[in-house]
Image (tube, rainbow, N blue to C red):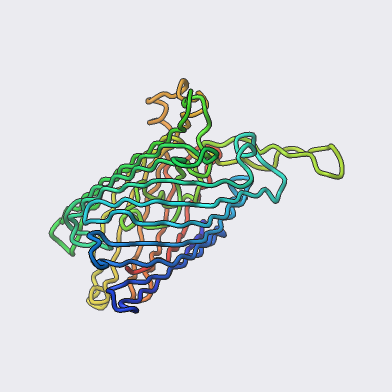
Protein backbone atom coordinates (compact mmCIF):
# COMPACT_ATOMS: atom_id res chain seq x y z
CA UNK A 1 0.00 0.00 0.00
CA UNK A 2 1.26 3.49 -0.85
CA UNK A 3 0.86 5.95 2.00
CA UNK A 4 2.04 9.53 1.72
CA UNK A 5 0.99 12.79 3.28
CA UNK A 6 1.87 16.43 3.57
CA UNK A 7 1.04 19.05 6.20
CA UNK A 8 0.61 22.70 5.29
CA UNK A 9 -0.48 25.75 7.27
CA UNK A 10 -0.68 29.50 6.93
CA UNK A 11 -1.39 32.57 9.06
CA UNK A 12 -2.51 36.04 7.95
CA UNK A 13 -2.38 39.32 9.85
CA UNK A 14 -3.91 42.52 8.50
CA UNK A 15 -3.27 46.23 9.01
CA UNK A 16 -0.54 45.91 11.61
CA UNK A 17 0.92 49.34 10.76
CA UNK A 18 -2.22 51.06 9.53
CA UNK A 19 -1.43 51.03 5.80
CA UNK A 20 -3.79 48.20 4.89
CA UNK A 21 -0.73 45.96 5.02
CA UNK A 22 -1.18 42.21 4.88
CA UNK A 23 1.38 39.89 6.46
CA UNK A 24 1.35 36.14 5.94
CA UNK A 25 3.45 33.27 7.18
CA UNK A 26 3.26 29.77 5.78
CA UNK A 27 4.88 26.43 6.36
CA UNK A 28 4.74 23.00 4.81
CA UNK A 29 6.22 19.61 5.62
CA UNK A 30 5.99 16.48 3.54
CA UNK A 31 6.60 12.83 4.32
CA UNK A 32 9.14 12.85 1.48
CA UNK A 33 11.35 15.07 3.71
CA UNK A 34 10.54 18.38 2.08
CA UNK A 35 9.98 21.47 4.21
CA UNK A 36 9.33 25.12 3.47
CA UNK A 37 8.75 28.26 5.51
CA UNK A 38 7.97 31.70 4.15
CA UNK A 39 7.05 35.20 5.27
CA UNK A 40 5.44 37.72 2.97
CA UNK A 41 4.17 41.31 3.05
CA UNK A 42 1.71 43.06 0.76
CA UNK A 43 0.70 46.73 0.61
CA UNK A 44 -2.44 47.04 -1.56
CA UNK A 45 -1.82 50.79 -1.92
CA UNK A 46 1.02 52.91 -0.56
CA UNK A 47 0.89 56.69 -0.96
CA UNK A 48 0.87 57.59 -4.68
CA UNK A 49 2.24 54.26 -5.94
CA UNK A 50 -0.49 52.87 -8.28
CA UNK A 51 0.36 49.16 -7.97
CA UNK A 52 0.46 46.97 -4.85
CA UNK A 53 3.86 46.37 -3.27
CA UNK A 54 4.80 42.82 -2.38
CA UNK A 55 7.87 41.10 -0.96
CA UNK A 56 8.47 37.57 0.26
CA UNK A 57 11.34 35.60 1.73
CA UNK A 58 11.32 31.81 1.86
CA UNK A 59 13.58 28.97 2.91
CA UNK A 60 13.03 25.46 1.67
CA UNK A 61 14.90 22.21 2.12
CA UNK A 62 14.27 19.18 -0.05
CA UNK A 63 15.81 15.76 0.32
CA UNK A 64 15.67 14.06 -3.08
CA UNK A 65 17.95 11.15 -2.20
CA UNK A 66 15.21 8.62 -2.95
CA UNK A 67 14.94 9.91 -6.50
CA UNK A 68 18.15 11.81 -7.23
CA UNK A 69 21.54 11.88 -5.62
CA UNK A 70 21.42 15.34 -4.07
CA UNK A 71 19.83 17.45 -1.38
CA UNK A 72 18.63 20.95 -2.21
CA UNK A 73 18.32 24.06 -0.07
CA UNK A 74 16.83 27.28 -1.42
CA UNK A 75 16.87 30.75 0.11
CA UNK A 76 14.70 33.02 -1.98
CA UNK A 77 13.66 36.66 -2.19
CA UNK A 78 10.72 37.71 -4.32
CA UNK A 79 9.64 41.27 -5.12
CA UNK A 80 6.36 42.14 -6.80
CA UNK A 81 6.84 44.69 -9.59
CA UNK A 82 3.30 44.74 -10.98
CA UNK A 83 0.09 43.18 -9.73
CA UNK A 84 -3.45 43.48 -11.10
CA UNK A 85 -6.42 41.14 -11.32
CA UNK A 86 -4.94 39.40 -14.38
CA UNK A 87 -1.26 40.38 -14.55
CA UNK A 88 1.57 39.71 -12.14
CA UNK A 89 5.23 40.57 -12.68
CA UNK A 90 7.87 39.66 -10.09
CA UNK A 91 11.62 39.46 -9.70
CA UNK A 92 13.03 36.43 -7.90
CA UNK A 93 16.53 36.03 -6.50
CA UNK A 94 17.37 32.56 -5.18
CA UNK A 95 20.54 31.18 -3.59
CA UNK A 96 20.59 27.45 -4.25
CA UNK A 97 22.82 24.92 -2.53
CA UNK A 98 23.06 21.36 -3.84
CA UNK A 99 24.87 18.76 -1.76
CA UNK A 100 25.64 15.11 -2.40
CA UNK A 101 25.95 13.49 1.04
CA UNK A 102 25.80 9.96 -0.36
CA UNK A 103 28.80 10.58 -2.69
CA UNK A 104 26.56 9.30 -5.48
CA UNK A 105 25.67 11.41 -8.48
CA UNK A 106 24.79 10.94 -12.09
CA UNK A 107 26.77 12.62 -14.83
CA UNK A 108 24.03 15.19 -15.51
CA UNK A 109 23.57 16.17 -11.86
CA UNK A 110 27.25 16.07 -10.91
CA UNK A 111 27.99 18.92 -13.31
CA UNK A 112 25.60 21.18 -11.40
CA UNK A 113 26.33 20.33 -7.76
CA UNK A 114 27.50 23.18 -5.56
CA UNK A 115 26.20 26.73 -5.17
CA UNK A 116 24.53 28.90 -7.76
CA UNK A 117 22.36 31.99 -7.98
CA UNK A 118 19.08 32.06 -9.85
CA UNK A 119 18.11 35.56 -10.93
CA UNK A 120 14.77 35.40 -12.74
CA UNK A 121 11.95 37.57 -14.01
CA UNK A 122 8.53 35.91 -13.80
CA UNK A 123 5.32 37.02 -15.52
CA UNK A 124 1.91 35.46 -14.83
CA UNK A 125 -1.32 36.07 -16.71
CA UNK A 126 -4.47 34.63 -15.14
CA UNK A 127 -8.17 34.58 -15.91
CA UNK A 128 -10.31 32.90 -13.24
CA UNK A 129 -14.07 32.67 -13.74
CA UNK A 130 -14.70 29.75 -11.39
CA UNK A 131 -17.22 30.09 -8.56
CA UNK A 132 -14.73 28.57 -6.06
CA UNK A 133 -11.03 27.70 -6.05
CA UNK A 134 -11.49 24.87 -3.51
CA UNK A 135 -14.53 23.12 -5.00
CA UNK A 136 -15.41 24.60 -8.39
CA UNK A 137 -18.80 23.60 -9.76
CA UNK A 138 -18.90 25.92 -12.76
CA UNK A 139 -16.67 28.31 -14.68
CA UNK A 140 -13.23 28.21 -16.22
CA UNK A 141 -9.70 29.47 -15.63
CA UNK A 142 -6.56 30.03 -17.69
CA UNK A 143 -3.02 30.53 -16.40
CA UNK A 144 0.14 31.38 -18.32
CA UNK A 145 3.50 31.60 -16.54
CA UNK A 146 6.66 32.82 -18.24
CA UNK A 147 10.05 32.80 -16.51
CA UNK A 148 13.43 33.98 -17.81
CA UNK A 149 16.40 32.99 -15.68
CA UNK A 150 19.90 34.48 -15.56
CA UNK A 151 19.06 37.95 -16.89
CA UNK A 152 21.62 39.97 -14.92
CA UNK A 153 24.07 37.34 -13.75
CA UNK A 154 26.67 36.16 -16.26
CA UNK A 155 27.44 33.09 -14.12
CA UNK A 156 23.85 32.26 -13.20
CA UNK A 157 21.55 29.62 -14.68
CA UNK A 158 20.16 30.85 -18.00
CA UNK A 159 16.90 29.37 -19.23
CA UNK A 160 13.44 30.14 -20.59
CA UNK A 161 10.48 28.38 -18.98
CA UNK A 162 6.84 28.51 -20.11
CA UNK A 163 3.75 26.90 -18.60
CA UNK A 164 0.08 26.89 -19.59
CA UNK A 165 -2.82 25.66 -17.47
CA UNK A 166 -6.47 25.60 -18.51
CA UNK A 167 -9.33 24.32 -16.33
CA UNK A 168 -13.10 24.03 -16.66
CA UNK A 169 -15.95 23.00 -14.34
CA UNK A 170 -19.40 21.87 -15.48
CA UNK A 171 -22.36 21.33 -13.07
CA UNK A 172 -24.31 18.11 -13.68
CA UNK A 173 -27.42 19.06 -11.74
CA UNK A 174 -27.72 16.36 -9.03
CA UNK A 175 -26.12 16.00 -5.57
CA UNK A 176 -24.14 19.16 -6.32
CA UNK A 177 -22.12 17.06 -8.76
CA UNK A 178 -19.61 18.79 -11.00
CA UNK A 179 -17.04 17.63 -13.52
CA UNK A 180 -13.68 19.40 -13.41
CA UNK A 181 -11.20 18.88 -16.25
CA UNK A 182 -7.75 20.37 -16.68
CA UNK A 183 -4.77 20.35 -19.03
CA UNK A 184 -1.26 21.61 -18.26
CA UNK A 185 1.70 21.98 -20.64
CA UNK A 186 5.22 23.17 -19.85
CA UNK A 187 8.55 23.55 -21.62
CA UNK A 188 12.01 24.71 -20.54
CA UNK A 189 14.94 25.62 -22.78
CA UNK A 190 18.50 26.61 -21.84
CA UNK A 191 19.65 29.99 -23.17
CA UNK A 192 22.91 30.51 -24.98
CA UNK A 193 24.70 29.78 -28.25
CA UNK A 194 23.76 26.32 -29.49
CA UNK A 195 21.05 26.19 -26.82
CA UNK A 196 19.52 22.91 -28.02
CA UNK A 197 22.80 21.14 -27.28
CA UNK A 198 23.19 22.71 -23.83
CA UNK A 199 21.91 21.15 -20.60
CA UNK A 200 18.88 22.68 -18.92
CA UNK A 201 19.26 23.13 -15.10
CA UNK A 202 18.16 19.86 -13.49
CA UNK A 203 16.39 21.35 -10.41
CA UNK A 204 14.34 23.72 -12.62
CA UNK A 205 13.02 21.04 -14.95
CA UNK A 206 9.49 19.69 -14.76
CA UNK A 207 8.68 16.84 -12.38
CA UNK A 208 5.40 14.95 -12.09
CA UNK A 209 3.86 13.09 -9.17
CA UNK A 210 2.86 14.27 -5.71
CA UNK A 211 -0.20 14.23 -3.53
CA UNK A 212 -1.70 17.75 -3.76
CA UNK A 213 -5.19 18.07 -5.22
CA UNK A 214 -5.09 18.67 -8.99
CA UNK A 215 -8.35 20.64 -8.69
CA UNK A 216 -7.03 23.18 -6.15
CA UNK A 217 -3.40 23.51 -7.22
CA UNK A 218 -3.64 26.06 -10.03
CA UNK A 219 0.07 26.28 -10.84
CA UNK A 220 0.64 24.88 -14.29
CA UNK A 221 1.19 21.14 -14.30
CA UNK A 222 -1.11 19.15 -12.04
CA UNK A 223 -0.25 16.36 -9.62
CA UNK A 224 -0.40 12.73 -10.65
CA UNK A 225 -2.01 11.11 -7.63
CA UNK A 226 -0.59 7.72 -6.69
CA UNK A 227 2.94 8.62 -7.77
CA UNK A 228 5.57 9.94 -5.38
CA UNK A 229 6.81 13.50 -5.75
CA UNK A 230 9.31 13.43 -8.64
CA UNK A 231 8.39 9.77 -9.00
CA UNK A 232 8.22 9.75 -12.81
CA UNK A 233 11.17 9.47 -15.24
CA UNK A 234 13.24 10.02 -17.38
CA UNK A 235 15.93 8.39 -15.26
CA UNK A 236 19.48 7.17 -15.56
CA UNK A 237 21.59 4.93 -13.27
CA UNK A 238 23.44 6.58 -10.42
CA UNK A 239 27.21 6.52 -10.69
CA UNK A 240 29.35 6.06 -7.61
CA UNK A 241 32.19 8.46 -6.94
CA UNK A 242 35.29 6.67 -5.57
CA UNK A 243 35.63 7.13 -1.80
CA UNK A 244 38.48 9.06 -0.20
CA UNK A 245 39.84 5.94 1.51
CA UNK A 246 40.37 3.96 -1.68
CA UNK A 247 39.83 4.10 -5.41
CA UNK A 248 37.21 1.41 -5.53
CA UNK A 249 33.58 2.06 -6.37
CA UNK A 250 30.69 -0.32 -5.97
CA UNK A 251 27.80 -1.00 -8.32
CA UNK A 252 25.06 1.63 -8.75
CA UNK A 253 22.40 1.39 -6.05
CA UNK A 254 19.61 3.44 -7.61
CA UNK A 255 18.54 5.78 -10.35
CA UNK A 256 18.46 9.53 -10.72
CA UNK A 257 15.12 11.07 -11.72
CA UNK A 258 16.23 13.84 -14.07
CA UNK A 259 12.92 15.54 -14.87
CA UNK A 260 11.85 16.74 -18.29
CA UNK A 261 12.20 19.72 -20.59
CA UNK A 262 8.70 19.07 -21.94
CA UNK A 263 5.80 18.02 -19.72
CA UNK A 264 2.08 17.44 -20.21
CA UNK A 265 -0.49 16.57 -17.56
CA UNK A 266 -4.26 16.25 -17.51
CA UNK A 267 -7.00 15.30 -15.08
CA UNK A 268 -10.74 14.73 -14.81
CA UNK A 269 -12.39 14.99 -11.39
CA UNK A 270 -16.03 14.27 -10.54
CA UNK A 271 -17.04 15.79 -7.17
CA UNK A 272 -20.35 15.03 -5.45
CA UNK A 273 -22.18 15.45 -2.15
CA UNK A 274 -22.46 12.50 0.19
CA UNK A 275 -25.96 11.25 1.08
CA UNK A 276 -25.92 12.18 4.79
CA UNK A 277 -27.08 15.72 5.62
CA UNK A 278 -24.48 15.89 8.40
CA UNK A 279 -21.71 15.56 5.80
CA UNK A 280 -23.30 18.05 3.44
CA UNK A 281 -23.67 20.68 6.17
CA UNK A 282 -19.98 20.25 7.08
CA UNK A 283 -18.85 20.52 3.45
CA UNK A 284 -17.55 16.96 3.43
CA UNK A 285 -17.84 15.53 -0.08
CA UNK A 286 -16.50 12.78 -2.28
CA UNK A 287 -14.82 12.67 -5.64
CA UNK A 288 -13.61 10.26 -8.30
CA UNK A 289 -10.67 11.14 -10.52
CA UNK A 290 -8.37 10.17 -13.37
CA UNK A 291 -4.93 11.75 -13.84
CA UNK A 292 -2.36 11.33 -16.61
CA UNK A 293 0.95 12.89 -17.64
CA UNK A 294 4.33 12.42 -19.25
CA UNK A 295 7.81 13.97 -19.49
CA UNK A 296 10.46 14.15 -22.20
CA UNK A 297 14.01 15.46 -22.35
CA UNK A 298 14.82 17.82 -25.24
CA UNK A 299 18.11 19.48 -24.22
CA UNK A 300 21.61 18.12 -24.87
CA UNK A 301 20.53 17.09 -28.38
CA UNK A 302 17.79 14.75 -27.13
CA UNK A 303 15.17 16.58 -29.23
CA UNK A 304 16.51 14.66 -32.25
CA UNK A 305 15.21 11.44 -30.68
CA UNK A 306 11.80 12.86 -29.69
CA UNK A 307 8.79 11.05 -31.16
CA UNK A 308 5.23 12.30 -30.64
CA UNK A 309 3.78 8.80 -31.01
CA UNK A 310 6.22 7.42 -28.41
CA UNK A 311 5.42 10.34 -26.10
CA UNK A 312 1.69 9.50 -26.28
CA UNK A 313 2.31 5.77 -25.85
CA UNK A 314 4.32 6.20 -22.63
CA UNK A 315 1.80 8.39 -20.78
CA UNK A 316 1.49 7.45 -17.09
CA UNK A 317 -1.98 7.40 -15.54
CA UNK A 318 -3.88 6.71 -12.32
CA UNK A 319 -7.47 6.67 -11.10
CA UNK A 320 -9.22 6.60 -7.75
CA UNK A 321 -11.85 7.83 -5.33
CA UNK A 322 -11.61 9.87 -2.16
CA UNK A 323 -13.23 11.96 0.57
CA UNK A 324 -12.45 15.63 1.19
CA UNK A 325 -12.90 17.10 4.69
CA UNK A 326 -12.61 20.90 4.83
CA UNK A 327 -12.01 22.53 8.23
CA UNK A 328 -11.12 26.05 9.36
CA UNK A 329 -7.53 25.01 10.07
CA UNK A 330 -6.72 22.70 7.16
CA UNK A 331 -8.18 20.73 4.29
CA UNK A 332 -7.86 16.95 4.49
CA UNK A 333 -8.00 14.73 1.43
CA UNK A 334 -8.00 10.93 1.72
CA UNK A 335 -7.72 9.13 -1.61
CA UNK A 336 -7.50 5.56 -2.76
CA UNK A 337 -5.26 5.62 -5.85
CA UNK A 338 -4.97 2.86 -8.43
CA UNK A 339 -2.07 2.96 -10.88
CA UNK A 340 -3.35 2.37 -14.40
CA UNK A 341 -0.04 2.68 -16.23
CA UNK A 342 3.56 3.33 -15.26
CA UNK A 343 7.02 2.74 -16.69
CA UNK A 344 9.68 0.43 -15.32
CA UNK A 345 11.48 2.89 -13.05
CA UNK A 346 8.50 5.01 -11.93
CA UNK A 347 7.69 5.26 -8.25
CA UNK A 348 3.95 4.70 -8.15
CA UNK A 349 1.93 2.33 -5.97
CA UNK A 350 -1.73 1.50 -5.55
CA UNK A 351 -3.03 2.42 -2.11
CA UNK A 352 -4.17 5.11 0.30
CA UNK A 353 -2.80 8.64 -0.01
CA UNK A 354 -3.28 11.50 2.48
CA UNK A 355 -2.97 15.23 1.94
CA UNK A 356 -3.24 18.09 4.45
CA UNK A 357 -3.35 21.56 2.90
CA UNK A 358 -4.31 25.13 3.73
CA UNK A 359 -8.05 25.93 3.52
CA UNK A 360 -7.29 29.37 1.99
Q: Quadrant of the C terminus?
A: bottom left
- In this rendering, would 158 be left or right of 287? right
Asked if 360 appears above or below 230 in the picture, the reply is below
Q: How many marks?
A: 0
Furthest-left residue in this view: 173
Position in image of residue 56 (x %, y %): 42, 62
7, 3: nearer the viewer: 7
Q: In the image, residue 27 lies at what x, y percent?
A: 46, 67
Position in image of residue 49 (x %, y %): 25, 61
In the image, 359 versus 78, the foreground residue is 78
Vertical placement of residue 212 versus 233, above or below: below
> Does residue 110 sit above or below 33 in this rendering?
above
Residue lying at 30% horizontally and 42% vertically, measured from the top left: 164
Residue 80 position by quadrant = bottom left
The residue positioned farthest toward the right in the image shown: 246
Name the residue: 70% across, 39% down: 252
Which residue is rendered at x = 30% and y = 77% of the image? 15
Please indicate whether residue 68 sits to the left or right of residue 336 in the image.
right
Give residue 143's position: percent from left, percent from top. 27, 47
Amino acid sequence: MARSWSLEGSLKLKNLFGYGDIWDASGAYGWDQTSEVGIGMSLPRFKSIPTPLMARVSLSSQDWLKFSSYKERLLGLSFGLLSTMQHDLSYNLTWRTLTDPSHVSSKSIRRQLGHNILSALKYTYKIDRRNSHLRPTKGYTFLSTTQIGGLWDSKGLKFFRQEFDVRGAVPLGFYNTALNVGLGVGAILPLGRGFMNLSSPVPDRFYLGGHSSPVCSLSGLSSLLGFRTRGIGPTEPQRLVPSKSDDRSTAPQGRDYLGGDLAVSAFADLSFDLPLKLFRDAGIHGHAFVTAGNLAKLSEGEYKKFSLSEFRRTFRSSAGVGIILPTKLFRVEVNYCYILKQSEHDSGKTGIQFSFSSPL
